[in-house]
Amino acid sequence: MTREEIGSYLGLKLETVSRAFSRFQEEGHIAVQQKRIRILNVAGLKALLNHRG
């Protein structure tokens, strides 16, 4: 899935998806390498969901 497709699926703009991916990478939750995204910290991502919900 492209970032644009992810945004469309979630009802978000491309810029929002890109900012989120950048933030998640800076915080060590994901690793982005070209078109591949590797989840490094599942618990951390879940904690973000619980924090916002």
Image (cartoon, helix red, strand yellow):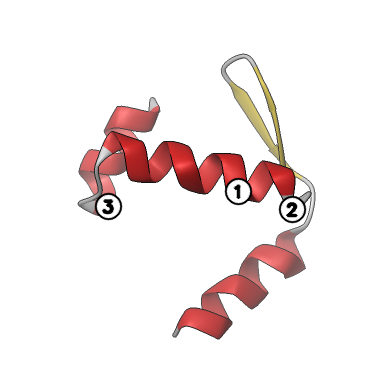
The answer to which quarter of the image holds residue 33 is top right
As shown in the figure, which amino acid type bears the numbered disc 3?
Answer: Leu
As shown in the figure, which amino acid type bears the numbered disc 2?
Answer: Glu
Q: Is residue 6 above or below residue 11?
A: above
Find disc 1 in the rendering and name its residue: 23
Q: Position of residue 32 (x, y in %)?
A: 67, 28
Find disc 3 in the rendering and name its residue: 10
Residue at 27% x, 52% y: name it: 10
Residue at 65% x, 64% y: name it: 45
- Marks 3, 2: nearer the viewer: 2
Quadrant containing the C terminus in the rendered view? bottom left
Q: Position of residue 2 (x, y in %)?
A: 38, 25
Residue at 58% x, 40% y: name it: 22
Earlier along the polypeptide chain: callout 1 or callout 3? Answer: 3
Find disc 2 in the rendering and name its residue: 27
Earlier along the polypeptide chain: callout 3 or callout 2? Answer: 3
As shown in the figure, which amino acid type bears the numbered disc 1?
Answer: Arg
Q: Is residue 9 above or below residue 53?
A: above
Q: Residues within 10 Å of mark 1 (few under 14, many from 20)?
A: few
Secondary element at image label 3: helix
Q: Is residue 52 above or below residue 46?
A: below
